[in-house]
Amino acid sequence: MFFIFGLRTKVSRSGVMRQVCRNCGNDVAQVITRRSTKFSLFFIPIIPIRTRYVQQCTFCGAQYDIAASDARRLPIG
């Protein structure tokens, strides 16, 4: 008997907002993405392992991890 298992990460775009970048200092659009990693058994995602929210500057490309509570309350437009 054999088992096929692994991890799968799904990246979904939560929204775009305008904010000053911490790296370059420009007031540009910041893309908020949600990265959810799940344990898969026979290619079926079963258990969520980790969820991260990332903010990325569209001007310089710098990425910052943000807390889930901060990502939910940001004014996304």
Image (cartoon, grey):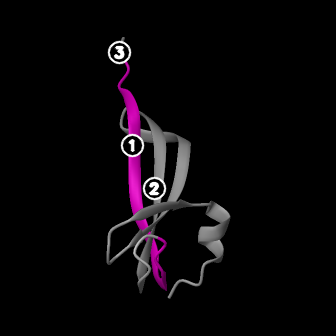
Secondary-structure class at tag 1: strand
Q: Amino acid at mark 3?
A: Phe
Locate residue 56 relative to residue 72 in the image: left or right.
left
The three-letter amino acid code for the residue at tag 2 is Arg
Identify whether 32 is placed above or below 11: below
Dot label at residue 2: 3
**Residue at horizontal 41 percent and vertical 69 percent from the top:** 56
User: How many circles with numbers are drawn on the protein?
Assistant: 3
Left or right: where 36 falls relative to 6: right
Residue 49 circle label: none
Magenta residue span: 2-22
Residue at 35% of width from left, 15% of height from top? 2
Residue drawn at point x = 39 percent, y = 43 percent = 8
The alpha-carbon separation of the residues under discs 1 and 2 comes to: 10 Å
Local SS, label 2: strand
Q: Position of residue 31 (x, y in %)?
A: 42, 74
How far is disc 3 from disc 1 in space, using C-alphas? 19 Å
Q: Which mark is residue 35?
A: 2
